[in-house]
Image: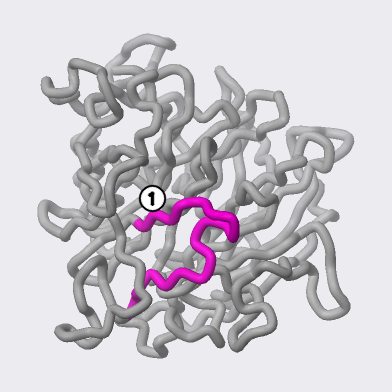
Amino acid sequence: MRVRIRLLRTLVVAATFVVAALPPAAGASVVGPTPASQITAASPLQAKIRLWTFVTGLDQPVYATGSRDGTSRLFIVEKTGRIKIWKGPQLYATPYLDIHTLVSNGSEQGLLGLAVSPGFKTNHRLYIDYTNTSGNTVIAEYRQSTSNPNVVDPATRRVILTIAQPYANHNGGMLAFGPDGYLYIGMGDGGSAGDPGNRAQSTGSLLGKLLRIDVNGTTSTKAYRIPSTNPYVGKTGLDEIWDRGLRNPWRFSFDKANGNLWIGDVGQNAWEEVDRAPHTTTGAGWRLNWGWRIMEGRHCYNPPTGCNTTGLTFPPIEYDHSNGRCAVTGGYVYRGASIPALVGGYLFGDYCSGEIWVTTATSSSVAPKVLLLDTNMLVSSFGEDGGGELYVCNLNGSVSKVVQG
């Protein structure tokens, strides 16, 4: 997530963001018109959607996810260090988790990610990604209180992994359990500009990578285990690495229907990209090299011309920084039930411009994208609940649900 124009964007949004009431609930709101070309709902590219803004007044929300335990709760992550619970029609006053004293508060730092265990209904375990007061990435496990299911027991805190960060930006922050039950961790290249340490390409660094670990066990030296099928086990390279060549994979997701991996990788100065890896017998993205810092999108970066692209995987989607665009926010393939035409469409957006696009999940290696909404939001994240319904987080303090237009 890039924040270099946040102040200007925030002032503009504060002056212009207006919501209007509409069903399905009092106080709900629509964001942006739907193009006339999308009236006929025949495919994801023709779907008609709107945003129902159901909660406001949050402190920099950066993620939302369903509890997936049958309670219909939505966990909302605030960058400043708290997780809130929404259970319609209310936002609970007491935070589910409050670690604000543990997190750093730089522009790209804070509490950045959350993943609930696939067995959360019975084991009550959740995992968070944050930058600590030293600026380093921490992956920690917590457990929900046994006496009060609407709060986390702080005494259950267990640090899984700490990764040193050389700079304050490009921290990644996304956590997600894959269809294999392992925890995937998105790590940026460590920051500054242009990846000066070439960390994203180095298999001796955890930065600029997607990592995969097993949190259901420990070893004598680690608070987790390494899956034996990780690509660098027994080879030159750190065992945690799943794939490499990422600049700042702020948000990634797995398609609920087939396990395909989608990554929104934030670009440098010119190009944003969305990466896609099909699920295979070895897993989605196994040992792929997404190209940074050799490539930015499908273009040479270092060197600026004549770069060697051997062994690199190109993104199906890229876009430039025209019209105020600055940083891609990766989303999800829609697998819900309330918007039939959208099923099989991958939604993603741009943090600065507030645009939300869709592409068909089965598109070719160069995928077309269609603008669904042009909002006044700082699109910090998308979220998904257990039923496959999608949400949009606005860093300016709101969370909206994607609903039928």
Quadrant, the N terminus: bottom left
Whether residue 191 is visible: yes
Q: Residue beneath label 1, please?
A: 330
Quadrant, the C terminus: top left
Tell me if 309 is positioned left or right of 246 in this view.
Answer: left
Mark 1 falls on what kind of element?
A: strand
Residue toward you, 149 or 335: 335
Q: Per the image, is 291 magenta?
A: yes
Q: Per the image, is 204 magenta?
A: no
Residue toward you, 107 or 206: 206
Q: Residue furthest front?
A: 281
Residue 135 point in image, percent of width and height: 54, 75
Q: Amino acid at mark 1?
A: Gly
Residue 340 point in image, percent of width and height: 38, 19
Tell me if 20 is positioned left or right of 197 in this view.
Answer: left
Residue toward you, 204 or 16: 204
Residue 71 point in image, percent of width and height: 70, 24
Decide: is 70 above or below 264: above
Could you tell me what secondary structure mostly forms the magenta stretch? Answer: loop
Whether residue 347 is visible: no
Query: Would you call the spot at circle 1 few (<14 residues within 10 Å), some (14-19), or many (20 or more)?
Result: many
Q: Quadrant of residue 25?
A: top left
- Which residue is located at x 57 percent, y 62 percent? 185
- Which residue is located at x 35 percent, y 34 percent? 345
Disc tally is 1
Decide: is 194 above or below 34: below
Residue toward you, 38 or 79: 38
Residue 15 point in image, percent of width and height: 20, 38
Residue range in magenta is 275-293
Decide: is 321 above or below 332: below
- Which residue is located at x 58 percent, y 67 percent? 211
- Which residue is located at x 56 percent, y 78 percent? 206
